[in-house]
Amino acid sequence: MNNIKKIIFAVIVLSFAAGAYFYPAMPELMASHWGGNGNVNGYMPKFWALFLLPLVTLASFLLFLILPKIDPLKANYAKFENYFDGFLAAFTVFMVYVYGLTILFNKGIEFNMTAAIVPAMAILFYLTGTVLENAKQNWFIGIRTPWTLSSEKVWDKTNKLGAKIFKLIGILSLALIFLGNLGFIIFVFTTVTMSFYLIVYSYLVFKKEGQNR
């Protein structure tokens, strides 16, 4: 485990410590889910509200540690390790940030949760695009289809296009702050549609590459 991963692990441990510290001061039912307009639309018992996000973050961290070791193409991870670690750090910071906002909200500090989360989500999507742009063929990180995994050229073309799309979605997601629930619907529709488009694109590039051989 390198120094970046050790710092990430320490941050996750601190989130558990924060949950234990704030546990006595939290209401028995805590606000835990918000709609696109920033209004609360879901509650959770305080134990789960305080420890579920840290548990998910820890599980994700451990999974990201394991995946490169069991990947048949694990040698390729070394080619984009810095970007991989950067994304892992950004993901962890995002989760801890959302966790911190949840605690603050339930402490009685009033703010629009959507407006607070969306900029961080935009940054995370943009950084996801950066990872896609630099990822080399592997079975777990990137746009993985039968065609991208069968051809390095198809992998590179598909993931570089995916990088541009994810960065653009990250920028466009800022509109969520102003459009509320409608913005959330547009965001989900755009993300799903573009993800499907990238699958089709990888197939078309694969077919074209085959015809040019």
Image (cartoon, grey):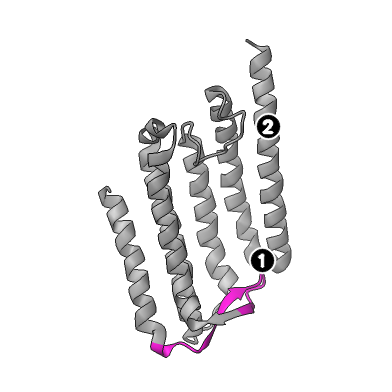
Return the residue at label 1: 178
Category of crowding for the residue at label 1, using alpha-carbon neighbours closer than 10 angstroms: few (below 14), some (14–19), many (at least 20):
few
Q: Nearer the viewer, residue 12 or 182?
A: 12
Q: How many callouts does the rendering have? A: 2
**Secondary structure state at the residue bearing disc 2:** helix
Q: Residue drawn at (56%, 63%), measured in percent from left and top?
A: 118
Q: In the image, residue 174 lies at what x, y percent?
A: 60, 59
Which residue type does callout 2 highlight? Tyr
Region of the chain picked out in magenta, as a range: 24-42
Q: Nearer the viewer, residue 173 or 151?
A: 151
Q: Residue drawn at (62%, 10%), measured in percent from left and top?
A: 213
Q: Residue drawn at (45%, 87%), measured in percent from left and top?
A: 26
**Left of 2 or right of it: where is 131?**
right
Q: In the image, residue 195 lies at what x, y percent?
A: 66, 43
Give residue 134's mark.
none
Choose top left, top right, bottom left or bottom right for residue 17. Answer: bottom left
Is 28 drawn above or below residue 91 in the view shown? below
Task: Tell me which label, 1 or 2, sits earlier in the chain.
Answer: 1
Q: In the image, residue 34 lies at what x, y percent?
A: 62, 74
Q: Is residue 204 at least partly visible in the picture?
A: yes
Q: Is residue 86 at least partly visible in the picture?
A: no
Q: Residue furthest left?
A: 3
Return the residue at label 2: 201
Q: Is residue 83 magenta?
A: no
Q: Residue furthest top?
A: 213
Is 130 drawn above or below residue 41 in the view shown? above
Q: Residue drawn at (43%, 59%), measured in percent from left and top?
A: 59
**Secondary structure state at the residue bearing disc 1:** helix
Q: In the image, residue 15 lies at what x, y percent?
A: 37, 70
Which residue type does callout 1 highlight? Phe
